[in-house]
Structure formats: structure tokens, C-alpha cells
Image (tube, grey):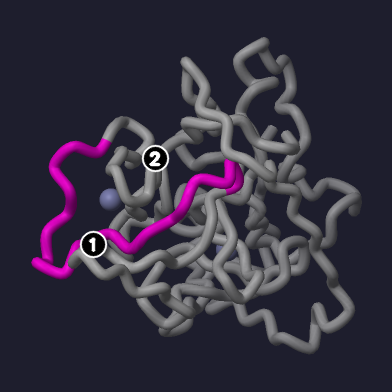
Amino acid sequence: MGAQLKDEFINYCIECLPEYVSNLSKTYLLPITPVKLETPINFSGNPQGGGGDRPDGSRQGEEGTGEKPQGPPPGGSEGDEKRGPSQRGVAFNGVAFDAPAPLHIILKGYTIPPIDDAGGHINLDSGYHYHAATGKTKEEAQNDHHAPMIGYAMDSHGLYGQLNEDGKEPDDLDDCRGHYDEVRGYHYHVDAAGNNNIINCFSGATASK
Ligand SMILES: [Zn+2]
Ligand SMILES: [Zn+2]
């Protein structure tokens, strides 16, 4: 069970070039109006978040390729039904902030998938996607020294940079990394670049699982 690394990829820097996925198109569904839930949607019981990365380089549906990014896990419980999409959000350029990269598989195989300055890289299932927000994508500056808006979470609540202009992370973030203010309503502050994480759960309903 779970994704396995094929022997030929162990001990390699795994390069996936843009031209490998030049004809890939992704459509993300977001609610028109965010709907806050009483209970947040946890991504998965798996600490790696059930992400879209499969470092064996195989294509979805191919024999023996392990995890399917958005399918229900074997023996899934009711809780798994509510875990939401594997993407955490979308940047203004349409590129997804994805689930954490599966470090347990990557490290076990001594492989390094290169991540660019924008916190992104490519795989065959997801195409180009981000694992971090590094300030290289379009940002909507705020007038009140609040962190800039960088996109939308998949529950349509706003995604903002980790730090406000004073260089500090808000101290009232909830378990999902969200909080409320009068200007923006409920919104998230993304995790620090390097933590292999964007947000921790969805406080609102998502349009797709
Ligand atoms: Zn990835
Ligand atoms: Zn805030």
C-alpha cells in the first residue's frame, strides 16, 4: 500500500521537464461564496497529506503506481470522505498550492525532486505546482500592514502570506492556520516556506473532494 519508489529512481535527482506535461490541463472548483464549517475538513489521517506527488515518475492508472492523488484510501472511514481535494489552494496565476510532498518516500529513496525559487516543480499527474509560497507569484498588497493576498484556498477563503509587514506571523491563527479580521473576514496565512506545508485544514466547505 502507498506509493513506492521504483528501483531505477533511487539515489537520483528526479528531473521532470515542463515539456513532459505540455498538454496537461487542470480545472479547480471553488465555492462562489466561502461557507465556514463547524468542524474543519482534515486533509487525511496520513501526515503526508495524500498529496499528488508520486516520485516514481509513473503516470496515473499505470500498473503498480501506488497512491492515486484524490481517490479514497483503502478502508477509508467516514472521516476520509470529508478530507477535501489534495490541492490546498490556487495562486493568482492558476497554479495550485499542493499537498505536502511525500517526504517519507523521497527520503527513503535518497532522491531529490528539485524545487524552484517559487517553491514549485513538476510531476506528471499535477503538472507544475507549488509546495511553498516564496513571494514569487502575484501578490495583492494590503493597506493595513497585513500580509499580501497570494490566492485562494480551495474552500474560497483568502490565502495570504505567512508574515505581516512587521515580519511577524499573527498570533491568533487557528488549527487550520486561519483567523478573522474586519477587513478580510476569515482567511489563512500560509505556512513558512521550507515547512512543506501550505495550510493545515479547510475551515470551509470545498466544492470537490
Ligand atoms: Zn510536488
Ligand atoms: Zn490575517
* Front residue (pair 137, 198): 137
Q: Specify the amino acid type for callout 2.
A: Tyr
How far apart are the two marked residues, 2 and 1, measured between alpha carbons? 13 Å
Q: Of helix, strand and loop, which one carries label 2? A: strand
Q: Give the range drawn in magenta.
A: 154-173
**Amino acid marked by disc 1:** His
Report the front residue among 136 and 159: 159
Residue furthest out toward the top: 78
For residue 64, side relative to residue 32 (left or right): right
Quarter of the figure with the N terminus:
top right
**Residue 145, quarter of picture:** bottom left
Quarter residue 172 falls in:
top left
Residue 60 is situated, as x and y percent measured from the top left of the image, at 84, 54
The crowding category of the residue bearing disc 2, from other C-alpha atoms within 10 Å (few below 14, some 14 to 19, many at least 20), is some
Q: Where is residue 38 in the image (x, y as percent from the top left)?
A: 47, 16
Q: In this view, does 204 lie to the left or right of 141?
A: right
Nearer to us in this view, 14 or 78? 78
**Image vertical order of residue 68 relative to residue 195, above or below:** above
Which element carries disc 1, helix, strand or loop? loop
CB under 8 Å between discs 2 and 1: no
Q: Which residue is drawn at 51% across and 56% down?
A: 101
Residue 149 x/y as whole percent: 40, 65
Mark 1 — residue? 146
- Is the residue indicated by label 2 positioned so its CB lies within 8 Å of ligand 2? no
Residue 128: quarter of image: bottom right
Residue at left offset 9%, top offset 67%: 166
Q: Name the residue under label 2.
A: 186
Asked if residue 149 is positioned above or below residue 77 in the image, the reply reads: below
Q: Name the main secondary structure of what is drawn in magenta.
A: loop
Q: Position of residue 207 (x, y in %)?
A: 72, 37
